[in-house]
Amino acid sequence: MSKTLGNQTVEWNKVNWRRLEKTLYKLQKRIFRASQRGDTRVVRKLQKTLIKSWTAKMIAVRRVTQENKGKNTAGIDEVKSLKPEQRPALVASLNVSERAKPTRRVWIPKPGRTEKRPLSIPTMYDRALQALTKLALEPEWEAKFEPNSYGFRPGRSCHDAIEAIFNYIRQKPKWVLDADIAKCFDKINHDALLTKLNTYPSMRRLIKSWLKAGVMDKRVFSPTEEGTPQGGVISPLLANIALHGMEQRVWEYANSIPRKKTHYKSGLGLVRYADDFVCMHPDKTVIEDLKKVINDWLKDMGLELKPSKTKISHTMDGFDFLGFNVKQHKVGKNHSKQGFKTIIKPSKEKVQEHYGEIADVIERHKAAPQKALISHLKPKIRGWCNYYSTVCSKETFNDLGNLLWNKLQRWGYRRHPKKSKTWVNNKYWGTVGNNKWVFKDGDDYLPKHVWKEIKRHVKVQETRSPYDGDSVYWSTRMGKHPEMTSQKARLLKRQKGKCAHCGLTFREKDLMEKHHVLPKALGGKDSDKNLELLHLHCHDAKHGKKINSTMELDANPW
């Protein structure tokens, strides 16, 4: 079925996405470069062109209906998803002058806690309009954002933030302000945010309508006088805009330090990931002053530091950030010229949380076949190990492996209480390559934590952005990202960073799927020779229908 948009007829699964993506990216690069030059007039002109563009509207709708991980959660319109034949109508209806509808409040549990976090889910229409607006605003602000901001930004990750911290403290132990902003998303002052946004009138009215739209919680309407609702497509970008300038304020303070203490400036560092940040300096007095300076700066945006989660510590005592523990240890001069060594590893809280998750999976699969247990444990172990594969995790991986071994042994013994331990061990454990005592069922097996290779992450260059047009730099980084499985990395390298269907270079935010050249139903294998990487929407188009977006597990567990 096809829909007509003006004089354009569209059959969704036959759209030439390659052409649309290239057209949009060229426009975004122009916005980025104009913003770098400080040419506001050109930025606004290009943004207005993008917002009105059929190309941008098509991609915005695709992102919220096909690629958004939360696309199956409905707003107050009760629309969870759209079929391909329904999407062109949404494209045709997008209008920036439309007033926003209230969001729907959904409560989700916080990991490891009893309390819940509120999400505000917009309608399908507002999600698409927010995605369209983000396409226009993000390139402008990526040219402006400070170099040590890493959260919710394209091409940047937690691993870049951790590497930045390592670089700041590697030469000298320092005092640390480990801070958290109280209810950051819920307390942002709307007027202050809109003033900082400093955009053109129709865009300002549109964003203001989202901020003021209100929220429906179990059919009870509540107005929103402050905050940017968590759950919206554009909310993380707006939060980053609200916190933009923190690093500049810190350096303004540094420049106020008397000249005879110039080393105070060079020893100062700030790393921010969304609303979590750390400041580092050799002098405790400077850190104490910075706590007050930053708290005063936040007040202009209606924010403040959260006392219970803001503390001053020292790198020799260690601190936790983004699930990592950062600590320096004294060593002899033979081991290090500085007399200390910086060790970054998974935090105790995250280790306990991970073990609790895998123990819960085993508990819930007491009577399940071994193959089912392996299939549920494998992605959890693989994902966790990939995340922590850039730091000193070998000891942690080994400890977790031992705990998991004991847990799986008890799982096997409990299933066969009348059999000997030798019989149980022979049934559930085997050899893979040179590795003995592997939890194994036929050709399927559970990878061990310690098998994951440790590779140091290379931090993103400070002035780089995916909108700078350097596809070689960004595709190389993508293939080396710690959370990229080894099989996907091999396929990406073989395909020279390009989608096997449309030929476009994969970009950082693109969702990739593995396509079986010979379908598994016809005897196709999970080997590299029978696989190719495609964009999610290209995979949909190749099959001619909406398919399950869950990727097949790698034949190689890493």
Image (spheres, helix red, strand yellow):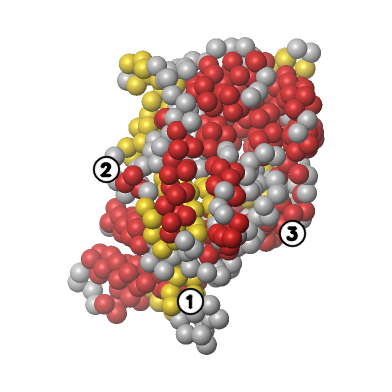
Which residue sits at x=68%, y=55%?
461
Which residue sits at x=75%, y=18%?
9
Percent x, y for residue 381?
Answer: 44, 60
Circles 2 and 1: CB distance less than 8 Å? no
Q: Which residue is mark 2?
A: 114
Q: Amino acid at mark 2?
A: Thr
Percent x, y for residue 429?
Answer: 38, 73
Q: Residue pushed farthest bottom? A: 334
Mark 1 → mark 3, Cα distance in angstroms:
42 Å
Q: Residue 2's image quarter?
A: top right
Earlier residue among tags 3 and 2: 2
Nearest to the eye among marks 1 and 3: give it: 1
Looking at the rendering, in which quadrant would you find the N terminus? top right
Q: Which residue is mark 3?
A: 494
Mark 2 → mark 1, Cα distance in angstroms:
39 Å
Count of marks placed on residues: 3
Determine crowd level at label 2: few under 14, some 14-19, many 20+ residues with C-alpha closer than 10 A: few
Earlier residue among tags 1 and 3: 1
Circles 1 and 3: CB distance less than 8 Å? no
Earlier residue among tags 2 and 1: 2
Percent x, y for residue 13?
Answer: 69, 30
In the displayed structure image, the side of residue 141 where residue 323 appears, left or right: left
Q: Which mark is residue 15?
A: none
Q: Which residue is mark 1?
A: 340
